[in-house]
Each structure stands twice: as C-alpha cells, then as structure tokens.
C-alpha cells in the first residue's frame, strides 16, 4: 500500500521502522535519564562556558585593553571568531531551507539538529561584535531609535550596520523556522509524557492537535519560510564579507569576497554538522536515522564547497599578480610568505587539500575519516578568517606601523568559552527536544524506508547496513 | 478552547492510505466529517477533503511589502529630509546602499508576520491547550472524527467498519 519507489534511491531510514518505532526511537533520548557520556560532556561544557563568561566579565570590567589589539591590528580574535561562528551557522539554514526547496529527502535526518546548531552558533557569534565595541552597555546606540541627539540616526550606508540588521534578522527567522518545525514534535512528546513533563510539553507544543487544516498551513508556512531563508542565508555572509570588501585595505577590497565567504560558510557549517552528528548518532543511538548515506551526502557538499573555496584562494592570488598593483601583490605575498605563513599553510592544507580525499567513495563513507576531516575543516576555516584579518592588518601601508598580534588569555578564554556555550546549549537541546524531526521522518518513511526500496523491499539487509553495524 | 462541549465519534486507522480511501468513501456517502487528525502531513489529504489552498503566502507578501516600504521609506526620509549627510561624496539618496537593510527588513517582516498569522488562524500559541481525542494521533494513528449531535450513529459505525478503522470511540470534548 505505498507508491513505487525507484530502486536507485538509497534508503534513509534503516531497520524496517514502523511509525510507532520512529516515535519510540526519536523521543527516547528526551525520556530516559541522561547517559554517563552526556553528563561528562555537560560538566565539561558548563565548566568551559563558565571560564568564557568569566573572561567576558573581565573584558567588560577592565575594558578591551585586556585584549592584545593595537593601533595597527584593530580586529583580532574577536572578528575572526565572529565570522567563524556565523559561518558555522550557515549549514543549518542551508539544510533546512535550500534542501527543502530542492526536495532533498536526506535533510529530514539532520535538519532539526543543524537548525539548532545555527541558532546556538549565531548566539556565540553575536557576543564578539557586542563586546568588541568596548562599552557593550551602549550597544543599543546601534539601533535607529528616536533619541535626544537630534535625533541623530545611525549610518545606514555602513556595512557594519547592514551586518547588525542581517544577523538580527537571520537569528529571528532561524528561530521562528526551527520552533515552528518543533511544535508538532513537542506534541508527540507531550502525548507520551506524564506529570510535570506533560505540563511542560503542553506549553511548548502550543496546543497542537494534528488537524488536517493545521498541517496544510504548516506545510505552506514551512515552504515560504524556506523560500525566505534561502536568499537570507546567502545575504548574511555576503554582508559579513562587505565588512571587508567595501574597505580600501589591500587583500580585503575584492569583489570575489561575497561568493567566496558564502561557500566557505557552508563548508565550515557542514563540517560542524558532521562533528555533531557523528557524536550524536552514536550517543543517542540514531544510526538508523542518520545513516552513512546522510554522512556521504554531506561529505559531497563539503567536497564541493571546499573546492570552491580553493578556487577562490587561487583566483585571489592570480588577480593580485594580474592587477599589477603593488600593494595588492604585497598583501598576498605577505599572506603566504610573511610572519603569519603558518596560518596560511594551515588554511590551505585543511581547507583545500584535505577535503580532496572525499573524491574516493570509500573515504566519504568512513565515519572515522569524516570525523577527522570535519575537525580539520573547522580548524582550516578558523585559520582562513585569521589569515584574512590579522595577516592583512599586520602589514599595512606604513612599514613604521607594522605590528604583530597574539591573543591574551582573555581573548582565548572568550573563544573557548563560546565553544562551551555552544555545546552546553546543544546538550540541553538533545535532552529537551527530539534531535531528529519526528513528523518529517514519518512523512518520508514510505519513500525512503529500507523496507520500501529495491531489493530491501524483500526484507534482505543490504551491504550498507552490515557495513554500518560493523562500526 | 471550545466553549461548548460536544460529543465526538471517531475512528482510528493504522495507515494513511486507508485514511485517504476512507475520506473518499465518506464523501461518497455524504458524511459530514468534523476533522481529520494525522501524525504528519499526509499528501493528498487536502485534495480529498476539498480544503482550500492556504492563503498564508498572501499574508507573507503583504507583510514583506510592509517591511520593504518601512525600511526604504525610513532611510529615504532620514537621508533626504530629516538629517541629510554626505557619505563618501555620494548623493543623499544613495539607493544601492539601502538595498541590504531593505532586503533584511522585508524578510524579517514577512517571516514574523506569517508565523504570527499562522498561529493566530490555527488558534495555537503559548498557553493554549486544545482537547485531544487520542494520544496516539501524534504517534501512529490516523483519525477521522464526526460530531454525533445530528449524525446517524449506525451509519457512521457501518462506515468505519467498511473502511477498515482499527478502533472506534466516542469522546466528549
């Protein structure tokens, strides 16, 4: 009693699941007591977060003099980390919005967690521009509100202000999209819960009943929100790149920045999704929902975007030479051969060379290589932002102003602290909400469940499943 | 939510295909379905139930236009009327520089407007608890519900039996 499924389709849900199995499996992590691994991870995350908040308080109390920024290098760890986190957030929206428009069914296994990752990453990102203003209690000056100074408005022509609007919009829209997707799943958890948890999920599920009309509107809303989020996500990193591209600093003033930043953002975001998913599926026992096929699909995206980023690096070098402009040529020579050569080398090795391994199918489908690669890419993309920011600023037009930058413990503390905040929020999320979208997985069961596809329809376990269980 | 209690007679199906066939049968028998509840969006359900297409996207367009006008109008007013300042030798009314913020506010207004419209028209929101017919509807059961007030119970029972409903129940909500 189901529509025929093309045999070339790969199954995305393994283990001959029924609808009830899906509910049981995906709601279980919110219902059981946390495992020892979760508790250890949570304690470590909270400890790291606490150190980060301490460093943040230190910065606010003593001022940004506690950072090692100087007259020449005005942006260091703060903006590097800001761009890094914003980039990581992009994969969530890409998976939930762009892949929805492209009708990619594999998104259902990972979209919920990836969207959560987006929201937490944007929270971490926002802390850096908020504190690097020096007097964060005056941050409301950035918003155009009627004031007693004229009113004197903000500069709407400034990319830094565009950034404020882009990031706030991005955060709000991602949150709305994510929560609307969560409402039916909270209702599923509510209808299984008793006592206090029932009350909690009753509030969270907004009174969802599963009425046909509600579902119809819910689908219409999801589709339009996806349509809005798609240009939005591309605009956000484009505008972040404008922070650099509209300046007159050699090495920043390039038209390639917007597409190159967007590709880099998706690249690093998918790497972070892989890092999280590989751990999550193992600890929460979700291997049948986040399968090797999902991991392979994401590795293909990593390979594509990593190669785009590589082409962008080479294009930059070529254009610097071809421009015949001395300052531009020096900026790029300095990136590769200057004082920060090691970060350029790290960037090239991690972002361009290592993902090429994914041309080989065997490596794309290996958990260990994927996990290792996801860490490499995260490091590489951090280096990329550091290269663009610190390396470029360290050698400006005047040799007398040349300088070198190393972070203080406060700056490192804030960075490590944001990792703590990110993982603390993510760990809480895995306890509070189903990590995989329950309703959406049920929706694709009859076209992506292994019992409905090709030879598996006869009930034989495929080689993939055996290979998978061997891990 | 509902002020008046009503008695509901409902049947639970185990598969969405059975549900779709049952609704077609109900249409053929001219039975007046109160509502259909499913654990996930079932494709083709709106067609067999003759539901009108959602107009949420129209709301989205209107809110988006409002955001567009707000952003573009406000920046135009500030830079041409209220406090004109020359930035980088550009004209006061430097339209290309207004594009990013105009775009962001268009998206923001459309998204917030649509989400608020969605929860409002569905009667959902924080603190709302609607009566639940059966707790397995959000798990794996597909439900067709009838109001018993002016229905022929025997005909409904025969209908559920014919269409293969696994269970039938009566509940006052």
Image (tube, grey):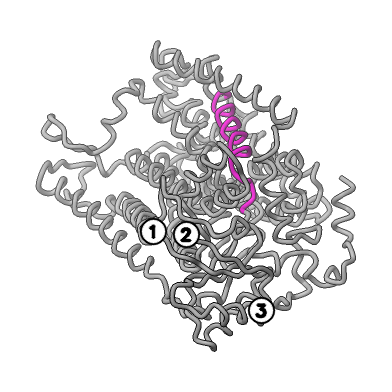
Q: Are marks 3 and 2 in contact (CB under 8 Å)?
A: no
Q: Are marks 2 and 1 in contact (CB under 8 Å)?
A: yes
Asked if A471 appears above or below B120 in the picture, the reply is above
Q: How far apart are the alpha carbons under marks 2 and 1?
A: 8 Å
The furthest residue to the top: A62
* x then y, percent, for residue A51: 55, 17
Asked if A170 appears above or below B3 in the picture, the reply is above
Q: How far apart are the alpha carbons under marks 3 and 2?
A: 23 Å
User: Is residue A69 in view?
Assistant: yes
Q: Do labels 1 and 3 share a chain?
A: yes
- Residue beneath label 1, please? B2
* x then y, percent, for residue A196: 55, 36
Residue A268 quadrant: top right
- Residue beneath label 3, please? B161
Q: Assess whether residue A383 is covered by the magenta stretch.
A: no
Q: Which of A179 and A89 is in front in this view?
A: A179
The subunit carrying tag 1 is: B
Q: Within 10 Å of the Cα at label 2, are there few (<14), some (14-19), or many (20+) other Cα atoms?
A: some
Q: Tell me the SS state at disc 3.
A: helix
Asked if A245 appears above or below B103 in the picture, the reply is above
Q: In the image, is B85 to the left or to the right of A195?
A: left
Which label belongs to residue A405? none
* x then y, percent, for residue A462: 87, 62
Q: Which of A402 and A471 is in front in this view?
A: A471
* x then y, percent, for residue A195: 58, 38
The furthest residue to the bottom: B28
User: Residue at coordinates 52% horizontally, 37% vertically from top-left?
Assistant: A120
The subunit carrying tag 2 is: B
Q: Earlier along the polypeptide chain: callout 3 or callout 2?
A: 3
For the N terminus of chain A, which image quadrant? bottom right
**Numbered range of the magenta stretch:** A416-437
């Amino acid at each position: 009693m189901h529509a025929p499924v093309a045999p070339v389709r790969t199954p995305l849900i393994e283990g001959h699941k029924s609808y009830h199995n899906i509910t049981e499996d995906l709601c279980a992590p919110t219902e059981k007591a946390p495992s020892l691994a979760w508790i250890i991870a949570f304690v470590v995350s909270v400890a790291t977060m606490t150190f980060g908040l301490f460093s943040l308080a230190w910065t606010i109390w003593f001022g940004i003099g506690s950072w090692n920024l100087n007259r020449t290098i005005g942006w260091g760890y703060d903006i590097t980390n800001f761009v890094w986190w914003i980039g990581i957030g992009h994969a969530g929206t890409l998976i939930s919005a762009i892949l929805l428009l492209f009708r990619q069914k594999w998104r259902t296994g990972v979209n919920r967690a990836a969207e959560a990752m987006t929201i937490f990453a944007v929270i971490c990102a926002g802390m850096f521009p908020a504190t690097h203003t020096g007097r964060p209690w005056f941050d409301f000056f950035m918003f155009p509100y009627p004031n007693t100074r004229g009113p004197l408005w903000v500069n709407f022509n400034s990319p830094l202000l565009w950034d404020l609007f882009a990031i706030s919009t991005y955060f709000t829209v991602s949150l709305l999209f994510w929560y609307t997707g969560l409402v039916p799943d909270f209702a599923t958890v509510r209808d299984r819960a008793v006592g206090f948890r029932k009350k909690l999920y009753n509030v969270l599920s907004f009174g969802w009943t599963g009425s046909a009309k509600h579902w119809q509107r819910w689908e219409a809303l999801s589709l339009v929100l996806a349509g809005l989020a798609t240009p939005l996500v591309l605009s956000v990193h484009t505008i972040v790149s404008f922070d650099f591209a509209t300046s007159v600093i050699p090495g920043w003033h390039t038209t390639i920045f917007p597409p190159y930043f967007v590709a880099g953002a998706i690249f690093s975001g998918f790497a972070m999704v892989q890092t999280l998913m590989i751990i999550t599926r193992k600890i929460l026992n979700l291997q049948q929902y986040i399968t090797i096929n999902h991991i392979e699909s994401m590795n293909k995206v990593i390979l594509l975007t990593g190669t785009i980023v590589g082409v962008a690096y080479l294009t930059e070098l070529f254009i610097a030479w071809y421009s015949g402009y001395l300052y531009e040529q020096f900026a790029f020579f300095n990136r590769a051969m200057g004082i920060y050569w090691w970060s350029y080398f790290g960037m090239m090795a991690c972002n361009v060379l290592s993902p090429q391994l994914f041309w080989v199918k065997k490596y794309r489908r290996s958990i260990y290589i994927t996990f290792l690669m996801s860490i490499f890419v995260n490091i590489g993309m951090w280096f990329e932002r550091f290269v663009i920011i610190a390396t470029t600023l360290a050698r400006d037009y005047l040799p007398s102003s040349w300088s070198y930058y190393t972070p203080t413990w406060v700056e490192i503390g804030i960075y490590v602290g944001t990792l703590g905040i990110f993982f603390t929020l993510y760990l809480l999320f895995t306890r509070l909400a189903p990590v995989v979208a329950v309703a959406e997985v049920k929706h694709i069961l009859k076209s992506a469940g292994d019992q409905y596809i090709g030879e598996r329809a006869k009930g034989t376990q495929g080689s993939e499943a055996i290979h998978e269980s061997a891990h | 939510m509902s002020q008046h209690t009503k008695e509901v007679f409902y049947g639970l199906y185990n598969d969405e295909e059975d549900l779709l066939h049952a609704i077609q049968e109900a249409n053929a028998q001219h039975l007046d379905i109160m509502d259909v509840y499913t654990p996930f969006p079932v494709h083709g359900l709106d067609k067999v139930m003759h539901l009108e297409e959602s107009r949420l996207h129209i709301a989205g367009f209107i809110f988006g236009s409002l955001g567009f006008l707000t952003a573009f109008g406000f920046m135009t007013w500030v830079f041409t009327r209220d406090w004109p300042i020359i930035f980088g030798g550009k004209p006061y009314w430097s339209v290309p520089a207004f594009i990013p913020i105009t775009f962001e506010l268009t998206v923001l207004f459309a998204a917030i407007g649509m989400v608020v419209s969605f929860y409002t028209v569905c009667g959902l929101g924080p603190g709302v608890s609607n009566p639940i017919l059966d707790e397995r509807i959000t798990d794996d059961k597909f439900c067709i519900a009838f109001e018993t007030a002016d229905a022929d119970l025997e005909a409904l029972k025969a209908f559920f039996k014919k269409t293969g409903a696994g269970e039938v129940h009566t509940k006052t909500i």
